Image (tube, grey):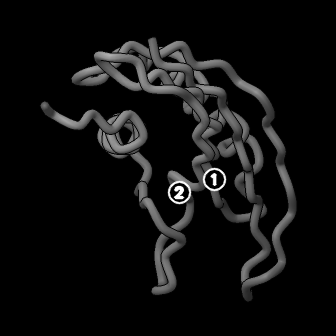
Amino acid sequence: MEILNPQAELTNALLHVLPLLGVDTYFYLPQEAVEYPFIVVGEQLATGTYTKERPIVSLKQVIHVYALADELPYIQRLVKLIEATVFNLQKTENFNWVNTLDEDVLLMDDSTKDQLWHAAITFSCNSN
């Protein structure tokens, strides 16, 4: 019996579709010098149950976006594009998904030498 992994399927799908927005996309916060803006497919919290045939899961998926402080209109537009992209990601190899936006937070980030915007976008992703 094949073991299905909905979390991995969703992460891999996001890592495939988000770069199509024209922005570098990572599954970790890069430590090396990178160009802004960039996207990080971040934290994932899973709950669910296993049926006889497949897992049914509910995921909280966080996607982070970092951009320079003078790129506010760009990051606001990019966040909306990410929201639409995740909403439209309704099928992976073994799962159908219903994705909804939970929260979209835009914060100033002064943890680097550059003033940044940091958007944290949280989605509920439910497989069926």
Q: Quadrant of residue 102?
A: top right
Residue 26: x and y in percent read 42, 60
The disc label shown at residue 40, or none: 2
Query: How many other residues sit within 10 Å of disc 1, few (<14), some (14-19) or many (≥20)?
Result: many
Q: Is residue 5 left or right of residue 117?
A: left
Q: Quadrant of residue 69?
A: bottom right
Secondary structure state at the residue bearing disc 2: strand
Q: Is residue 54 left or right of residue 7?
A: left
Residue 103: x and y in percent read 80, 33
Image position of 27 with respect to 89: above or below = below
Tell which of 89 and 107 is nearer to you.
89
Residue shown at 56% from the left, 29% from the top? 48
Q: Please name the amino acid that badge 2 sits on.
A: Val
Can you say which quadrant of the picture contains the C terminus?
top left
Image position of 26 with respect to 44: above or below = below
Residue 120: x and y in percent read 73, 49
Q: Quadrant of residue 67?
A: bottom right
Tell which of 11 and 104 is nearer to you.
11
Q: CA distance from mark 2 to mark 1?
A: 5 Å
Tell me whether circle 2 and circle 1 mark residues in contact (CB < 8 Å): yes
Q: Earlier in the sequence, mark 2 or mark 1?
A: 2
The disc label shown at residue 64, or none: 1
Viewer can see residue 37: yes
Image position of 118 with respect to 86: above or below = below
Can you say which quadrant of the picture contains the N terminus?
top left
Tell which of 45 and 99 is nearer to you.
45
Residue shown at 60% from the left, 54% from the top? 43
Q: Please name the amino acid that badge 1 sits on.
A: His
